[in-house]
Image: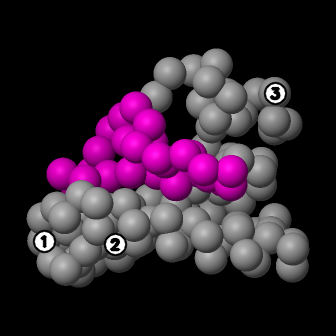
């Protein structure tokens, strides 16, 4: 899949509407349309990377920025102290549904300890 067909690239470009929570020069944060917890946001890098498996050494700082923004979103939602979960699904077996790297930020209730 190339960028022209990528759902998240279209959301980032403003071609498809989404409820945005935050944006800066590197990322856009949107509310998940099918939330799995009371607070469920997606941190989307503006740079198109199909998955974390396609990251290059020059993308390390971007991933760190995504994690920092996720932490800031949890603080803003008032769930940082109680706890939250960060998830990156990668590839078919990792249940990645959109082929654009994205970081799930989930919280607002006690989450199951089961990971798979």
Q: Picture coordinates of residue 6 (x, y %)?
A: 71, 34
Which of the two labelled residues, at mark 3 and mark 1, occupies the earlier sequence position? 3
Q: Which residue is mark 2?
A: 85
Magenta stretch contains residue 27: yes
* Relative horizontal placement of residue 1, taking residue 26 as reference (left or right): right
> In percent of the image, x 51 and y 73: which residue is there?
68
> In percent of the image, x 73 and y 75: which residue is there?
61
C-alpha gap between disc 2 and disc 1 = 10 Å
Q: Secondary structure at mark 2?
A: strand
User: Range of the magenta residues?
Assistant: 19-45
- Location of the N terminus (image quadrant): top right
Does residue 93 appear in this view?
no
Magenta stretch contains residue 11: no
Along the line of sight, the residue nearer the viewer: 101 or 44: 44
Compared to residue 20, the image places residue 54 above or below, namely below
Q: Secondary structure at mark 3?
A: helix
Q: Picture coordinates of residue 99 (x, y %)?
A: 68, 47
Q: Which residue is mark 3?
A: 4
Compared to residue 34, the image places residue 52 above or below, namely below
The answer to which image quadrant residue 73 occupies is bottom left
């Amino acid at each position: 899949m190339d960028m022209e067909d990528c759902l998240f690239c279209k959301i980032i470009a403003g071609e498809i509407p989404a409820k945005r929570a935050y944006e800066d020069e590197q990322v856009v944060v949107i509310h998940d349309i099918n939330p799995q917890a009371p607070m469920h946001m997606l941190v989307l890098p503006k740079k198109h990377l199909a998955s974390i498996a396609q990251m290059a050494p020059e993308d390390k700082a971007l991933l760190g920025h995504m994690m920092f923004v996720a932490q800031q979103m949890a603080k803003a939602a008032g769930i940082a102290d109680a706890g939250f979960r960060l998830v990156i699904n990668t590839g078919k077996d990792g249940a990645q549904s959109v082929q654009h790297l994205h970081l799930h930020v989930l919280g607002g209730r006690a989450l199951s300890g089961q990971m798979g």
